Amino acid sequence: MKNIITLFFSSMILIGSSHAQCNKELSDLAIGKLKDNYTFQKEIKIKLKKDKKSKVPQKIVQSLVLTAGQNYMFYAQNSKDNNSKVIYELFMGKGILGRSYLNGRHYKGIAFMCMKTGTYNLAYYYEKGEPGCSVIVVSSTKF
């Protein structure tokens, strides 16, 4: 079926210990906030430990394939146990296409209208290298 969107994620790295709300309940909260006309595609579970050795926040980058003709929504749900919110950025090559943190303000979602099928990257990290647990839900609809 040509209308099926294929999302694949390269080796997802999950680091850290479990948190009180870092489970299916957190995923359910994120999925429950999808817009009616969007179809759930994938969830990305994030668990990062504080990196005591590095002064630079740990950043994980994942590749994914997005299909032209689709509007994508990336939505984050943070655990209530987190000290900071997950920051994530969608980019292709060196060009940033969307980010969840801009001008000192956190946004829960990134909307992206895909004009070109290809491999995109999603990077995520926590402010100041804080540990945390979050879920990013990827959904889509045709435009």
Image: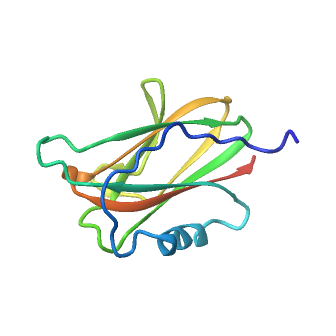
Q: Quadrant of residue 18?
A: bottom left
Query: Relative to residue 22, is residue 123 depicted above or below?
Result: above
Query: Relative to residue 132, is residue 128 depicted above or below?
Result: above
Q: Is residue 22 left or right of residue 50?
A: right
Give the residue displayed 25% in from the left and 54% down from the top.
49
Q: Position of residue 80 (x, y in %)?
A: 34, 74
For this orientation, the residue located farthest to the right is 1
Image quadrant containing the N terminus = top right
For this orientation, the residue located farthest to the top is 93
Q: Is residue 83 left or right of residue 36?
A: left
Q: In the depicted view, which residue is nearer to us: 92 or 17?
A: 17
Give the residue displayed 56% in from the left and 40% down from the top.
9
Q: How is the image coloured?
A: rainbow
Q: Position of residue 68 (x, y in %)?
A: 71, 34
Q: Is residue 93 left or right of residue 112?
A: left
Give the residue displayed 41% in from the left and 44% down from the top.
13
Query: Relative to residue 19, is residue 39 depicted above or below?
Result: above
Q: Is residue 131 left or right of residue 86?
A: left
Q: Position of residue 27 (x, y in %)?
A: 52, 67
